[in-house]
Amino acid sequence: MIPKKKIDETVAGYDKRKLAIATLCSHSALQIFHGAKQEGFKTIGIITKQKLAMYDAFPLAKPDEFIFVSDYHEAADALDSLADKNAIFIPHGSLIEYVGKQIENLRAPIFGNRRVLFWEANRQKMFQWMKKAGLNVPGSTIPEKIKGPHIVKFPGAKGGRGYLIVSSPKEFKEKTNNVIKAGLVTKQDVENALIQEYLTGVRFYPHYFYSPLTKYGLRVGEGHVEMLSIDRRIETNVEEIYRSHAAGIKTEPSFAVAGNMPVILRESLLVDVLDMGKRIVEASIDLFGGIPGPFCIETICDEDFKFSAFEISARIVAGTNLYPNGSPYTPYLFKEEMSTGRRIAREIKTAMLMGKLDKVVY
Ligand code: AMP
């Protein structure tokens, strides 16, 4: 991994009056550019030609400059060139997917802590983090000991596609054999699958932002954590599976995200949601030096209002795209409309004015 010192030297050499915000044109890029423009930054989009029309269609979220690539899997050089353009790169869900391990050695400063992207990508590490934070997490087991409903998550199969629901060792064997035969997974994938207790309840995905720069509201570490918004994912086909069942069609549930819906929580539950965010930041500081910027905890709340967490997204999540003008919670934190994209740009601006850009990039 490129040493933090190198990245600090790069930003120290930046012309602060010409600081730019850059990202891959995908996932939550419209929101990131829109927010960066609201805060007065120059914006740079790394893009394939095919996607250009989409950004032309939304002029207020269209980046000022484009860097063209033929494929996002080959974006590493373009990302590196940002180090010569006074730019800070904002990571989002598509980054790990497209650029993968090469992120470790990118010369360009990345907003947040790039170490965290690898804690997020490794399920064992993620659970270590959530447990250290004292969050309730679903139990996991081995194939021979499956008793009751469990969800089988194959390595790399993030986003819920191809998960299996099994209730016994026999069912595990049958269903995994089927997906191996169908060529959907390998034997090795099955051996390395996470077999997780199936949680019953309602899902909430709160979006947080940790600032190590300022103390305001809920204090944590050197700074504070904000809860900016909450969404609920629309996942196909589990979401409306009762319709198929009512029609007599027996379908296996799938959990691939197709969209997002806004959520407002019963107010008394906010205490627990805020506490989870605070603990995740505290644990991140101990484990890998903190998590400046946005993150999301994927939770399920049961009938006793007990929250369990089954995943962390350690960067801006697509659910925040619901709130380009702020959420029902942001007016209690900011006098102006505040999206997560704008909050990122605001943090970079604050860091720049305080002479502390090194605190928010790696
Ligand atoms: P993940 O890839 O872990 O984000 O999971 C994708 C989706 O699968 C989630 O949004 C949930 O709808 C569902 N899911 C994941 N883990 C569990 C679990 N332990 N119990 C019930 N549903 C789950």
Image (cartoon, grey):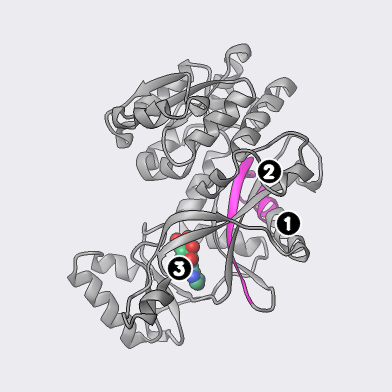
- Estimate the x, y position of residue 326 in percent, counting from the top left: 66, 41
Which span of residues is magenta-colored? 280-302
Residue matched to label 1: 274
- Label 2 packing within 10 angstroms: few (<14), some (14-19), many (20+): many
Q: Secondary structure at mark 1?
A: helix
The answer to whether residue 239 is visible is: yes
User: Which is in the foreground here, disc 2 or disc 1?
Assistant: 1
Q: Which mark is residue 239?
A: 3
Number of the label disc, if any, that sits on residue 210: 2
Label 1 and label 3: CA atoms lie apart by 27 Å
| Structural crowding at the residue carrying mark 1, measured as other residues with C-alpha within 10 Å and reported as few (<14), some (14–19) or many (≥20) | some
Q: Which mark is residue 160?
A: none
Which of the two marks, 2 or 3, is nearer to us in this view? 3
| Residue nearer the viewer, 70 or 190 | 70
The secondary structure type at the circle numbered 3 is loop
Q: CA distance from mark 2 to mark 1?
A: 12 Å
Magenta residue check for 118: no
- Residue in the image at 54% along x and 56% along y: 261
- Tell me where residue 169 appears, x and y as whole percent: 35, 86
